[in-house]
Amino acid sequence: MRRLLHVSASPRGTVSFSRTVGEELAGAVTAATPGWTVTRRDLSHTQLPHPGPDFARANALAPDMRGPAEEEALARSEALIAEVEAADVLVISTPMHNYTVPSALKAWIDHVVRPGRTFRSTPTGKQGLLADRPAFAIVSCGGRLGDPPAGQVDFLTPYLRYVLATIGLSSLDILCLEEMNRGPEKVAAARAAARPWSAACVARAAAPPGA
């Protein structure tokens, strides 16, 4: 049995472009080969709290120094990390908010990217502790990306690549759906561009692990 985790961050529900393309990709991956299960982590439907003081104190302690209170403070983080660890394929669908990830996705990242748990610090930099696997991100943007004034600066995609690589997920392919607030023609063009990208993702996800 292979597992796909779809993390969606748009607050727009079923009318979200990023969520729709993410669901289409998840469906295509699981239909291509038998034996898949899908876990959906909808960050707008069930909002995660941002890490607070109890989390910070518990996270700063070595595992053998934690008691029941610290374990409880980290329980949500452990559950989210376990979802990633169990997934053979990760799909993230998200809008771009104010040039970067929305706060809902940032909360998920802050629970999952943890020193001593999903990465460790070494003299040569941070080293991921999770096994790499195919990861795909669909990013929806209302305008056009690029240098101002014609486009807008994209802090989201380099950040997402860097932070996922920090925990070991360096095999990330990103599709940017641009100009989604600029009329149906732009939406249709972005959706058309998504099809060959999704097909390539399906082929990559269908490959045997380690291939």
Image (cartoon, rainbow, N blue to C red):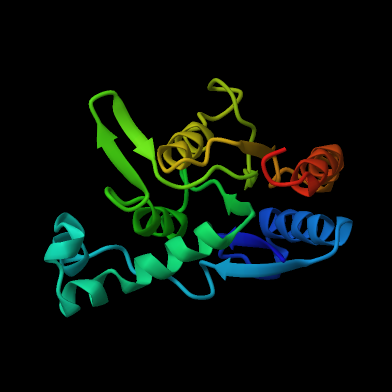
Q: Going by the image, does 177 lie left or right of 127?
A: right
Q: Is residue 159 visible?
A: yes
Residue at 23% x, 25% y is: 123
Looking at the picture, does residue 167 appear above or below residue 24? above
Q: Quadrant of the N terminus?
A: bottom right
Q: Going by the image, does 94 lie left or right of 176?
A: left
Q: Going by the image, does 93 lie left or right of 60?
A: right
Looking at the picture, does residue 4 appear above or below residue 67? above
Figure label count: 0
The quarter of the picture where residue 177 lies is top right
Who is closer to the viewer here, 133 or 11?
A: 133
Residue 179, position in %: x, y?
Answer: 69, 39
Who is closer to the viewer here, 100 or 92?
A: 92
Residue 143, position in %: x, y?
Answer: 63, 38
Residue 132, position in %: x, y?
Answer: 55, 42
Residue at 25% x, 77% y is: 72
Residue 128, position in %: x, y?
Answer: 40, 40
Residue at 51% x, 45% y is: 131
Q: Is residue 178 visible?
A: no
Q: Going by the image, does 190 lie left or right of 133?
A: right
Looking at the picture, does residue 111 appear above or below residue 116? below
Residue at 32% x, 34% y is: 126
Q: Quadrant of the C terminus?
A: top right
